[in-house]
Image: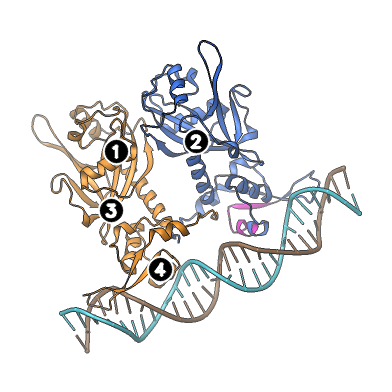
Chain colours: A orange, B blue, C cyan, D brown
Amino acid sequence: MNTTANLVEQKIVLNNSVSVDCVIFGFDFMQLNVLLVDRVMYDEKSGKELFNDLTLTGNHIFEEEDLDEAAARILFDLTGLKNIYLEQFYTFGSPTRINRENDKAWLAANGRDPNHRIITIGYYSLLDTDKVTLEWKGRNVRWVPVSDVTELAFDHMEILQKALQALRKKLTREPIGFELLPPKFTLSQMQRLYEVILGVTLDKRNFRKKVSRMKYLVPLDEKQKGVAHKPARLYVFDRDIYETTKTELLDFAI
Amino acid sequence: MNTTANLVEQKIVLNNSVSVDCVIFGFDFMQLNVLLVDRVMYDEKSGKELFNDLTLTGNHIFEEEDLDEAAARILFDLTGLKNIYLEQFYTFGSPTRINRENDKAWLAANGRDPNHRIITIGYYSLLDTDKVTLEWKGRNVRWVPVSDVTELAFDHMEILQKALQALRKKLTREPIGFELLPPKFTLSQMQRLYEVILGVTLDKRNFRKKVSRMKYLVPLDEKQKGVAHKPARLYVFDRDIYETTKTELLDFAI
DNA sequence: GCAAAAGTGTTGTCTCTACACCCATGT
DNA sequence: ACATGGGTGTAGAGACAACACTTTTGC
């Protein structure tokens, strides 16, 4: 869904039947958030508010633009960040994607044909909420804790759920979380990251035992400073070691 | 890519920028095959063969048709089979997907604009080669062992590789292979299935130990008949037990 | 009786879960 | 001195890889 129409006018879009939707997850050590856009619709005559809800962030694809590039552009336009972890997870194209009255009314009011099907390619990304100054902060884009989201416009709730599922599956198999930690981090910070994103609690000793087997997690001779408790050892994530030692898990599950 | 143009004319297609490509894997206990379509192009004047290669199977999406339905229709048109395991795995939309001369010439000769980008949604499916009577058998659709495929038209080699990767990952985590076995099967047949599709060899005793922990694999009081060796016990896959006992693996990997 | 595939057990190593206390620092 | 999070070990259970011989059938 196009929620940033002002940007589209600058270039020729590929066509009006395909878009990219980004599920932008933000992690802040407290909770997992998702970036949502306010959608408000007023009655044309009375000016009365008809509804006020939220959508994911999306946009059209430009000519000469790869799908990944379109997703990265949407992310950049909203956050000013580049080179962020971004992954395609599913494409949504049911002919009945848009069938609620609110959604049809909103499209019609925004100059689009509510009966024209749009296929949208879903991407999710994961970034540090605190590193972002939202371009539209305080206006209509904001972070919402994922656990608070119960309803979204269009079929965006379904897209969000599928994105969350894909993110969690990925995080359990690959080290995609280290961009969210400081370059030097403590094991407690790392544990907290996994707990927040996976929505579980983990045993501290067992977590450390597991982690001590990850060769790409390099302990430093350096400790935290200025904390009112025993200072923790710092670690770094070594991508080179990860790339050279990683092994496919082809062992099949019960 | 549209390789079954005769079918498209019957209905209105959604638009000319989106298609579905199916990577149809066929298993036959000997090897893993993929269904490919011959693509031959002749010189207009001399009638000389310009090239002769292979493509995956694909088609446009009709109005009022869900993406999954489009993929199922392509599969049905080629094999006459319905209710086959089918899964969306990735969407390909690079602006430079089609940039080889052969591909451009072929599109132009088939009345399409070689510079018009088509985004294609990839599905893979998995079925029993022997259960299929190819609708176009002997004409231009045929099974090719996956290991023999080194080159395909367009970006279809990339699509095939990504499909194979997705299939293998899925097979290691979920019981998607039982449609390929007879309703009552032996453990050796099941082991062979995993070996062929994953491209590995497994230890018989360890395989059976693992399998004996899968409660949804129910041993019968019934044995093979008419085989010139010790007859094997037969098993059935119980989907109900699988659904009720399956558990998410959220344990994260090293 | 022979060919062909079925079926079975052990050992050593590793990983998992569950669980409770002392340590180093800032205030 | 106290509050705060850091850091550690064990035991029992289950899973893993490696490895070789006997059994049952059809011919």
Q: Where residue B35 appears, x then y in whole percent?
A: 57, 32
B67, B159: nearer the viewer: B159
Q: Nearer the viewer, mark 4 or mark 3?
A: 3
Front residue of B159/A90: it is B159
> Dot 2 lies on which element?
helix
Measure the alpha-carbon separation of dots 1 and 4: 38 Å
Q: Residues within 10 Å of mark 1 (few under 14, many from 20)?
A: many
Q: How many marks?
A: 4
Nearer the observer: mark 2 or 4; the answer is 2
Location of residue B127 by image quarter:
top right
x, y (%) of residue D8?
41, 79
| Membership of B209 in magenta stretch | yes
Name the residue beneath numbered marker 2.
B157
Is residue B213 shown left or right of residue B188?
A: left
Residue B220 in picture, x, y percent from top left: 68, 51
Q: Which residues are magenta?
A: B208-220
Q: Which residue is mark 1?
A: A70
Instruction: Confirm whether circles 3 and 1 share one chain.
Output: yes
Residue in the image at 50% along x and 56% along y = A247
* Residue identifier under label 4: A207
- Frontmost of labels 1 and 4 is 1
Q: Which disc, if any, is residue A127? A: 3
In reply to whether residue A56 is colored magenta, the answer given is: no
Q: What distance separates the C-alpha of mark 2 from that of mark 4? A: 41 Å
